[in-house]
Image (tube, helix red, strand yellow):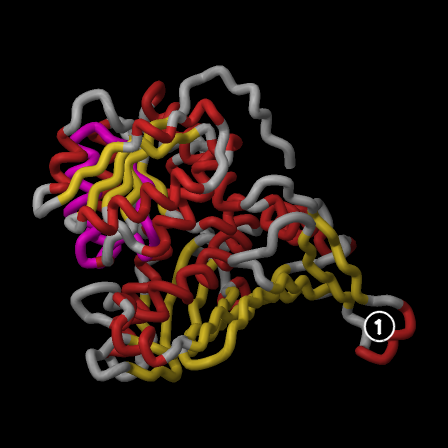
Amino acid sequence: MTLSTENTTPPLRIGILGAARIARKNIAAIKHEASNCIVVAVASRSAAKANDLIANYVNVPTAEHLHIEKVKVFSGNNAYNDLLASVDLVDAVYIPLPTTLKKEWTIRALRSKKHVLVEKPVAPSAEDYREMIYEAKLAKRYLMDGTMFVHHPRTDRFLSHIISSESSNNASSSSFGAVTGIDAAFTILGNDDFMKNNIRMKKNGDFQGCIGDLGWYCIRLAQLTFRGVGVGSVKSAQVSDWKLNEEGVPIDATCLVTFQADDVNADADSNLTLSFHCSYLHPWNQRGEVYGTKETAQVMGFINPKDGTVSFQTCNKQTPSSAHKTGGCVDVHVPCEVPQITLMWSKFREYCKVVEKSGWADNDEASACILSEMSWENQLIVDALMESIGGNGKAVKLPMGTSI
């Protein structure tokens, strides 16, 4: 995928609220000219942390048009408010704050007429995110989450292979066949410092733990796949096994989410399930597998792929021995010239301009609102999984047709 660097439109001016580590990664992405964005301000209660972020921004070579010497620092207890109140400085803000603070500062940003890209999980609850969306629509500003892999061309290619097969006039004659389920995993092995001090371990920080952090991506893969084949409603969510830290935050969870066809008259056979494992207690693993009646499609490292050409694999229904002999598994290679995180910022800018011009076009399936609707549903599932843990592993039912 090639993005033109000859764009004459002005870049989207970005302000950063907070100096979280993930902000460094996003600043590096924004420096890429293909983002058509520019960091113009950083706000942190700690001046040292804000200046450290700016030093990181300045010290890496970047295109001349970014004018990095104009980055402004806001520090002190009123830093976030000062940035949001600035006149003709910032078009949009990036919010990597702890989950407990996201609703407050997202709404303040939207009321200040700033677009918002907020890190996942997007809010303390789906109901909170519903309020955030309401404020975005009222302000005619865009609200998007930072789920990067959605914007990678491999994701499009992976989904196209699955969805175009099932969506054909005769799915039984397609290469993949009908989708029957998804299995996914995202695990990391946290060291002692991470397990004791990271904000994802704190009930007053990112209290949804590994479910809101790592499980979020597994859920999004299922949303993208199931929506594509017409199974877009979430029926239930359940955590079958889990571990909590001493603050009651999930650090390991095995989960099951059931989706149902949008047709309320559909029978139980139309249900599709996502099973996934998310954990801070196991070595690095990022895996997504979609099962079909004729093929299985597997993508490794689907959340944070390496730069350049990456791949996914499809295997037909032959036995392992016959597949070995006949080449039943095929690697599909997908080039990507621009990092997925930069592609995310480029898409964010595009949608910001669309919303500024036309508002939230709720009836347009290709519009910016679809991503935010998926963020809301993603958060709804996270909420239900947290409720399942609180209910000793019971399945939590979700009402059909629920939407923002």
User: From this viewpoint, which residue is outermost toward the left?
Assistant: 77
Q: Give the range drawn in magenta.
A: 100-128
Residue 96 vs residue 66, the one in the foreground: 66
Q: Is residue 118 magenta?
A: yes
249 shown above or below 308:
below
Q: How crowded is mark 1: few (under 14 residues within 10 Å), some or many (20 or more)?
A: some
Q: Residue at x 28, y 64 (%)?
A: 383
Task: Note whether residue 183 is visible.
Answer: yes
Image point (52%, 32%), residue name: 34
Instruction: Name the amino acid type tagged 1.
Output: Ala
Task: Decide which of 365, 9 is in the foreground and name it.
Answer: 9
When the figure is inspected, residue 47 is found, relative to residue 397, above or below; the finding is above
Q: In which quarter of the image is the C terminus?
A: top left
Quarter-wise, where is residue 134 in the image?
Answer: top left
Q: Is mark 1 on a helix, strand or loop?
A: helix
Q: Which x, y percent locates residue 171?
A: 71, 53
Residue 62: x percent and y percent?
Answer: 49, 34
Q: Nearer the viewer, residue 148 or 263?
A: 148
Is residue 327 rendered to the left or right of residue 202? right
- The answer to whether residue 171 is above or below residue 284 is above
Q: Residue furthest top?
A: 8
Spot occupied by residue 257 in the image (x, y as percentages of width and height) = 43, 68
The one of 201 and 16 positioned closer to us in this rendering: 16
Residue at the image position 30 percent from the left and 48 percent from the top: 52
> Where's the N terminus, which quadrant?
top right
Q: x, y percentage for residue 2?
A: 64, 32
The residue indicated by pointer 1 is: 323
Q: In this view, does 310 lie to the left or right of 97?
A: right
Residue 397, image quadrant = bottom left
Please identify the quarter of the rendering in which residue 258 is found: bottom left
